[in-house]
Amino acid sequence: MISVTTGHLDTEVPRAAPRRRPSGVRLRRRAVLIEVVGAAVWCVVGFHLLVGPTRRFEVSLAAGLLHLFGVSGVSGALGDAFIIFGPGQQPIVAQLTPSCSAINSILALSALGFVVLRERAQVLMGLVAATSWVLLANQLRLISSLLAGRYLHLDVLVWFHDWVGAGLNFCYTIGGLLIMIAFTMHMPERAEQDRSGRHTARRPDTWARPGLGYRVELNGRPPAPRIRVAAFVHRHLLPRSVSRRLAGRRERGRIDYRIGHLEPAARVEAVRRLAGRGLAAHTATLVAVATYETDTEVLDALADAVAARQWEPVSDRQIAALRLWARAWMMRAPDDDTPTGKLVAVTGAGGPAGVAVIRALRAAGRPVLALDASPDAVGLRLATNAEVVPRADAPDFGDELVRILDKHRPAALICTVAEEYAALHPLVARLTALECATWLPDPAAVEVCLDKRAFAQALRAAAVPHPPTAATRAATKAVPGPWIVKPARGRGSRGVVAADTRTELHRAFATVPEPIAQTRLAGREFTADVLVGRDGTLLTCVPRWRDETKAGISVRGTTFDSTAVTAVVAATLRAVGLTGPANVQGFVADPQRLDGDPDADVKVHVVEVNPRFSGGLPLTLAAGADVVGTYLAGILAPDAPLPRLTFQPGVHMARYFAEVYYADGGEPVPDPLASA
Amino acid sequence: MSAVAGTSTPLTHSPADDAPPHHRRRLLLYAVVLVVAFGILGVNHTIWAISVFLDAVFLAYFVRHLAFAISGARWAERDLSAANVGFDSYTPPVAVLVACKNEELVVDGMVSALLGLDYPADALTLVVVDDASDDGTGARLDAWAAADRRLRVLHRAPGAGGGKSGALNDALRLALKGVDAKVIVIFDADHEPDRTVLRRLVRHFRDPAVGAVMGRCVVRNGIESSLASTVFIDYLSGYLVNEYGRQALFELPAYGGANCAVRTSTLRALGGWNPDTVTEDTDLTLRVLLMGQRVRYDPTAIDFEEAVSSSKRFWKQRHRWALGHQKCLRDFWRPVLRSPHLTVAEKIETMMFLWVYHVPVLCGVGLAFSALRAFGIGGPAPTSLVPLSVLLFAGPFAELAVGLLLGRVERRAAWMLVGFVPSFGLAILTITAAYLDGMLGRRYSWIKTARSGGVTAATAAATAPAADTAVADSGPFSFARRAPVQR
C-alpha cells in the first residue's frame, strides 16, 4: 500500500502552465468593459429591431397630428413616408430615414440610464419622461419640416430638416439626458448639499462623509415640497400593512444622524435602545455608529449589544458586517496607554470651578475622577468616579491622594484649588511614576498671586495699573478712599469689607485678618479667563463683565472685546510669571467707550489674579474658547504647541440653581424634574 | 526644457531659458500635409477622412468618460463612507508647503486651517512661502508666525522667478534644510484643508511604491456666482468620477498640484518641481510614473478651495492649464511610450490623459468642417454630425450626473448642467488659443489666479493676530472673533 502511494507521489504529473490570475484593476476594467460593450450591443441590436416600427409609429403620429390640426396637402402615413404637396401642388415623397427617427436618442438614453444611473430607482421614471420628451420633440421637428415643405418650398423641407433639425436633434437629446439625470437626483430634503456646495444635511461633523458640503451658515432649512407624493400614497392609497412593511424596510436603510449630535452618555443609551429593537431594525444606523464613532464607551456599548444578539438571524449582509466588526473590536489589542486611558482627576470638585471643569470634561467624552475634601461636594455626583481626599493642609493629604490615584490610575490631574498647588508640587515625581501627568505653575508665581501684598508689589514694579494698596494702618494715609479692606490671603469675597470713612477703615483693619486696604475702584468689574502656555505664550484672554455676583461668584456675565483689557491682562501675567489657567479680575473705569470700539484706550486696573480656572468658566467655554480641553492637551503632551483660542464677544450667561440627589450611601436618586 | 525622469539634477530656472520653445515648423508641416492631401485626395475626401479620424477620437474619449462614470457609479459611494484603517498608527514626519503671492484676501483662512490640522505636532512642519507679495500677505504671515511658533515663513526676493515651482523649490532647499520630513504636502493659498487631510494622505505611503498622493479639492464659494457653482459641479465630476475612474481602472490618477503629497526622497531624486512649466503638477505626475513609482488618489482627503468667479479669471486659469498640459504632451509622449514601467493599457490611458487638452482643439476643427459643409464643401450630410456631437457631450454629462449623485447634490442642480454647453464652447476657444500660443512659442509667465476671499470656513475666527500674543511682549491685541474687515 505504501509503495503504491509512494509510486503515485513520485510520478511527475505534467502540469498546465499556471493561469495568470487577473489583478484587481483588470477585474474592474473587465466589469466596466462588459457594461460598455453591453450598452453598445443594446444600441445596435435595439436599432435593428426597433427602427422600423418606431419610424412607422412616428410617421403615423405626425400624420395624425397634422390632420388633427386640419393641415391639408400632406398625405396620411404611407409606411415610413408621406406624400407632400408643395405650394405649387407638386408632390414629393418624404421618407423618414433611420437617422431622423427618435429611436437613436431613445436607445442611447436607455443605455446610459442603465449602465450609469441604475443604482437609483428613479431612473425608470426618468427614462419614461426622457423618452416621451424625445418623441415629442422629434415630432415637432418632423411637423416643422413638413410644414416648411408644404407652405414654403420643398427644398426648404430638406434644408430645415437637415440643418435646423440636426440642431434640434442635438438639443432635445441633451435635454432628454438632463431630464433623466434630474429624476435620479436627490430631493432637497434628502440631498446633503445645495447647488452651491453648502452642507444641508445637518450631519454632525464626525458623521459627515468627507467633502460633502462646505459648512457655512444657511438661512433656514431647504424649502419642503408643496406636494408630498410619497406621503399621499402611503396615507391614502396603500394598505396600512404594506405601508408599514415599506416603512420598516426604509428604516433599516436609513441613518439617524441625530444620534451623532448627542453627548457620549446619550449616544450609549441610543445605541443600546436601537440594538435592543433588533439589529435588523436599524441596521444602517448601527453600521454608521461602527463607522464614524470614536468614543470607546459608545463602541463598547455597540459591541456588547451585538454580542448579546448573536441569536438574531443574519438576514442582511450588513448584520454580518456588524458581527465581524464587533468581533474585531472585542479582540483588539489592549491600549498601551495608562490603564484607564482617558480618565482625568479633578480636585476641588465642590467649587464652582471644579464643577465647571468636570462638566466640560464629561461633555468632551472624558471619564472624570472627582476629588474633594467634602463628601457632599456636588462635583462628586457629576463625575464617573469620585473619592474624598483630606484637605490640602492635612498631613496625610499627599499619601492619601497618591493612594487614590494609584487605585484609579488617571491619565492626568487638574487642580482647581490654588491653595493645593503647594501641597501638590512635592508629589510630582510620585504622580509621574503613576503615569499621571499634571501641569503646575511655578510655586513662586502662585505665591505672588495668593499673597495680595506681594501681588501689589509685583504689579507696581511692572508698572501695571493697580489700585493703591496699603498693608498697614499707617500706610493707609497714602491711599485715597473710599476703600476696600480684605485679607491678604483669601478667596472670593470672604472677609471683604467696604469702608467709606477713616473710622470704618480703622475698624475694618482691626477685624479683618492680615488686612490690606485698597482704593475702591469705580467703573465696571470684569474677570478675564486666560490660559498661558508653558513657554509664556498667552493662548487666550476672554474678558467678561461681572454683571451680577453672589458670594464672589459671577451669576450673570457677558463676554466683551477690548484690546486695552487684553494688554493689561497680558502685562499682569508677565509680571507674575504664571503659566496654565488663571483668571484676572479688575475694573474698567470708562466702559462706555468700548461700545462699538473694542480698540478704545480705556482705563483698566487689575485687582487680583487667581492661578486657576474661574467659577465663571462656563461662559468662557460657551463663548468658544475651550480652555479646559486645551489645558488638558497641554498636560498630556507637554511639548506639543497649543492652539490660540478665540472667543465670541457678546455672549451672555444667566445662572440658575441645579440639583443632584443621592441617598445616604451615595447612590443617585432620580431627578423628578428631569426631562424624559 | 524637456523633463528627464529619474535624475537628481535640480530643476533650476535659468534666465537664459526664458525664450520659450516654439513648434512653428511642426505647424507648417501640418499645413503642408493638409494642402497636399487636398491636392491628392480632393477637398471632400480629405475632409471626410479627417472627420472619420475625429469621430474615432471622440468615440474613444466617449468610451473613456463612460467607463469612468460607470466605475464612479459602482464603487465611489462605498469608498466615501468606508471605515478608516490604521488612521492613527502611521504618522511619518510631514512638511506642509504653501506658496503665496499676493494672497491677502485668503491667507488668514489658509493659515488658520493649517494650524488646526490634526497631526502630531512633533511630526509636522508648516512652511508658507511669501513669493515677493506686494500686498499685505507678508505682514499677515509674519503676524501669524509671531503668534504661533509652529509656522515658518519664508520671504522670497522680488524677481526670484520660477513661479509656484520656484517658491516650492526654495522652501524645499531653504526652509526644510535639516528637517527630516518623509512626506511633503502641498496646498495653495486659497485652500482650507480639512483637519484630517494629512492622516488621509500619508496613509498611502505605507506602500513603498507610492511616490505621490492626490486628495480631493472641493469648491467652497459656489454661492459667489453662477460660474463658481458651475465649477463646483465640474470639480465633483472631475474628482469623484474622472480622477476616481483613472485610479479604479488604470491606477493612474494625476497629482494635482494642491492638496497632494509627495514622498520627499522621490521629489529630491527628481530634482524638485519643474520651474519651466506652468503646470508643475502634471509634469511631476509624469516624472513620478516614469521613474517607476505610483500616484494614488484619496477621495476622502478633502480641502476646500476657491473657484474662479468671473469669466475673465476662468479664461486665464484654463488657458494656463491648457498651455502647461499641452506642453507636457510634447515633453513626455516619447518617454511614456518607451517606459518599461507602464503596461500597454497604462500607456494608452496616459496618452489619452495627455491628449485631453488637445481634444477641444479637434472639436474646433470639427466645427470648422461643419461650417464648410454648410457651403457645400466636405460632403452634404450634416445629420452625420449629430451622433458625433451628442457623443461629445454624453460622456462628460454622464460623468457630471454621477458626480452630482455621489455628491448628493439637490435636484435643481441638474439644470445647471445646461451651462456646460456654452462653457464647452468657451473651452474650445481658450484651449485652441493656448495650443497656438504653445506652438508659436509666445512668451508666457505665471499669472496668479485672482481670489475673492468671500467665503471661508474660519471667517471671523481666522484673522491674523494684530500683534504678538506672547505674554513676554506688549501691544494691542485681542482674542475676540471680529467681523472680517471690508476689503
Image (cartoon, rainbow, N blue to C red):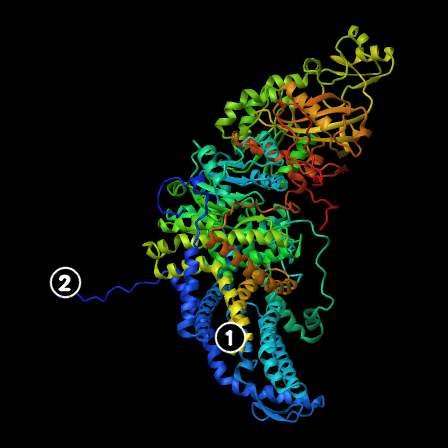
Q: Secondary structure at mark 1?
A: loop
Q: Is residue A314 visible?
A: no
- Front residue of this view, candidates B429 and A445: B429
Dot 1: within a 10 Å radius of its alpha carbon, few (fewer than 14), some, or many (20 or more) residues? some
Q: Same subunit under labels 1 and 2?
A: no
- Front residue of this view, candidates A370 and B89: B89
For residue A10, which numbered disc appears in the image? 2
Q: Classify A26 as above or below A70.
A: above
**Residue A611, percent from left and from top:** 65, 24
Q: Secondary structure at mark 2?
A: helix
User: Disc 2 is attached to a residue of which chain?
Assistant: A
For residue B391, which numbered disc appears in the image? none
**Residue ranking furthest to the left:** A3
**Residue A506, percent from left and from top:** 83, 10
For residue B377, which numbered disc appears in the image? 1
**Residue A248, percent from left and from top:** 61, 66
User: Disc 1 is attached to a residue of which chain?
Assistant: B
Separation of disc 1 and disc 2 at Cα?
78 Å
Three-letter amino acid code at the position of disc 1: Ile
